[in-house]
């Protein structure tokens, strides 16, 4: 028996348990920590699926940076001790269910992992390997694909990350409201 399906199944079970745990928790700190563990499990799943670049990104951004930013946000915000009654928000739930149904429907068109008959394996990969260095002038094939063939896609990803970073800096660097006394200052 191959070990990859067993690891995939165990990671999937842990991911589902983590997701339901996050939904059931009421404390924001515990939710943040479990969310970080969820991202770490996703990184493990990406590694098992032979996507180390995505796994490293998920580990760094999802498990690392996002968790730290959420913890910092929790430390900067006031806690409210009033318990709010949990009321089902039907519109967001409907949007999530419709999006999930569309994604599940779209799975049927995806080629199986490692399928040599997939369109990407029939045309694009052979061309990149055979003439990638001549067409781009870049000796490293991975760099040639990311920087030349997929240059606009990579640029778009960089713009999204840059915009998110600017947004976080603006949120964390906001000046205090007038009339509020800082903790380290005396009134």
Image (spheres, rainbow, N blue to C red):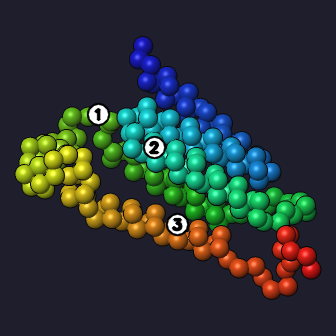
Q: Residue at the location (65% across, 47% down)?
A: 35
User: Residue 68: x and y, percent?
Assistant: 64, 53
As measured in the structure, the alpha-carbon distance from the residue carrying label 3 to the one carrying label 1 is 35 Å
Q: Would you call the spot at circle 1 few (<14 residues within 10 Å), some (14-19), or many (20 or more)?
A: few
User: Residue 84: x and y, percent?
Assistant: 86, 62
Residue 165's disc number: 3
9 or 55: nearer the eye? 55
In the image, taking residue 115 as reference, residue 79 lies left or right, namely right
In the image, taking residue 24 as reference, residue 45 lies left or right, namely left
Q: Going by the picture, which residue comes out furthest to the top?
A: 1
Residue at the disc numbered 1 = 114
Residue 119 visible in the snapshot: no
Callout 3 touching callout 1 (CB < 8 Å): no
The secondary element bearing badge 2 is classed as helix
Q: Earlier in the sequence, mark 2 or mark 3?
A: 2
Residue at the disc numbered 2 = 56
Q: Residue at the location (46% across, 63% down)?
A: 161
Quarter of the figure with residue 141: top left
Q: Residue at the location (42% across, 45% down)?
A: 54
The secondary element bearing badge 1 is classed as loop
As measured in the structure, the alpha-carbon distance from the residue carrying label 2 to the one carrying label 3 is 18 Å
In the image, taking residue 9 as reference, residue 83 lies left or right, namely right
In the rendered image of this protein, does residue 113 appear above or below residue 123? above
Q: Would you call the spot at circle 2 few (<14 residues within 10 Å), some (14-19), or many (20 or more)?
A: some
In the image, taking residue 178 as reference, residue 161 lies left or right, namely left
As measured in the structure, the alpha-carbon distance from the residue carrying label 1 to the one carrying label 2 is 21 Å
In the rendered image of this protein, does residue 93 appear above or below residue 127? below
Q: Earlier in the sequence, mark 1 or mark 2?
A: 2
Residue 172 visible in the snapshot: yes
In the rendered image of this protein, does residue 122 appear above or below residue 180? above
Q: Earlier in the sequence, mark 3 or mark 1?
A: 1
């Amino acid at each position: 028996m191959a070990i990859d399906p067993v690891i995939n199944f165990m990671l999937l079970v842990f991911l589902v348990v983590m997701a339901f745990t996050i939904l059931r928790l009421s404390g924001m700190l515990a939710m943040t920590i479990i969310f970080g563990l969820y991202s770490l499990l996703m990184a493990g799943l990406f590694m098992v699926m032979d996507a180390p670049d995505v796994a490293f990104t998920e580990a760094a951004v999802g498990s690392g940076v996002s968790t730290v930013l959420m913890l910092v946000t929790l430390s900067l915000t006031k806690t409210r001790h009033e318990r709010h009654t949990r009321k089902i928000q039907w519109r967001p739930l409907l949007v999530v269910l419709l999006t999930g149904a569309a994604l599940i429907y779209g799975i049927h068109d995806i080629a199986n992992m490692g399928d040599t008959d997939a369109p990407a394996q029939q045309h694009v990969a052979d061309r990149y390997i055979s003439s990638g260095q001549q067409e781009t002038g870049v000796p490293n094939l991975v760099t040639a694909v990311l920087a030349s063939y997929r240059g606009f896609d990579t640029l778009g990803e960089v713009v999204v990350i840059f915009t998110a970073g600017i947004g976080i800096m603006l949120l964390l660097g906001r000046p205090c409201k007038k009339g509020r006394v800082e903790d380290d200052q005396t009134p």
